[in-house]
Image (cartoon, rainbow, N blue to C red):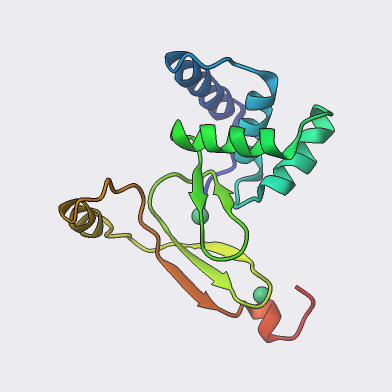
């Protein structure tokens, strides 16, 4: 898990985003900055809908397609990771390859703290002629709350 970001770390992350946007000839807009900051503050897997809901509190008038486009741009810039583990697409502030566990009852997704040896898989994919991007390892199961029959 992440340490809670300090103000200095948050500023450094924002400076990095501004540089990355400018290098790509992309505009630095308040919605891009807000969504980037939200992702780091929430520090967990989020759907575009949740990002829209929270971002709208700070900047009304944002649309879901804009939020998707921004999250995809952040993913391209290496500032977020798209996680497809069944259910809605999630965006993750952790960008290095890491494993997930997903509850098949309530859909909750958490990180698993294990070493990921994805390099051989990526190498094999390249050898098969694929331009390999990211590797996923997903464990499917039932979370403790669902197993206990609690509302999840
Ligand atoms: Zn569950
Ligand atoms: Zn994750």
The relative height of residue 141 versus residue 71 in the rendered view (above or below) is below
In the figure, 90 relative to 32: above or below? below
- Identify the residue at horizontal 61%, vertical 64% (top origin): 87
**Residue located 40% across and 65% down the image:** 137
- Is residue 49 placed above or below 147 in the rendered structure? above
Residue most toward the left?
127
Q: Where is residue 57 shown, x and y percent of the image?
A: 83, 34
Placement of the C terminus among the 4 image quadrants: bottom right
How many discs appear? 0
Give the quadrant of residue 76. top left
Report x, y in % for residue 19: 47, 16
Observer-nearest residue: 66 or 6?
66
Residue that protrudes farthest toward the front in the picture: 129
Q: Is residue 64 left or right of residue 46?
A: right
Q: Residue at x 63, y 26 (%)?
A: 32
- Image coordinates of residue 126 in percent, x first then y, are 20, 51
What residue is at 69 percent from the left and 25 percent from the top? 31
């Amino acid at each position: 898990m992440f340490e809670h970001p300090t103000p200095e770390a948050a500023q450094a992350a924002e400076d990095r985003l501004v540089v990355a946007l400018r290098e790509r000839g992309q505009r630095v807009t308040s919605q891009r900055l807000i969504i980037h900051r939200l992702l780091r503050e929430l520090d967990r897997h989020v759907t575009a809908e949740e990002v829209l809901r929270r971002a709208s509190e700070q900047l009304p008038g944002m649309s879901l397609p804009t939020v998707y486009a921004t999250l995809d741009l952040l993913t391209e810039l290496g500032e977020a990771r798209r996680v497809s583990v069944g259910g809605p697409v999630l965006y993750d502030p952790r960008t290095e390859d890491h494993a997930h566990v997903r509850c098949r009852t309530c859909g909750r997704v958490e990180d698993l703290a294990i070493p990921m040896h994805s390099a051989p898989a990526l190498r094999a994919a390249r050898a098969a002629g694929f331009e390999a991007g990211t590797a996923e390892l997903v464990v499917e199961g039932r979370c403790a709350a669902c197993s206990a029959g609690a509302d999840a």
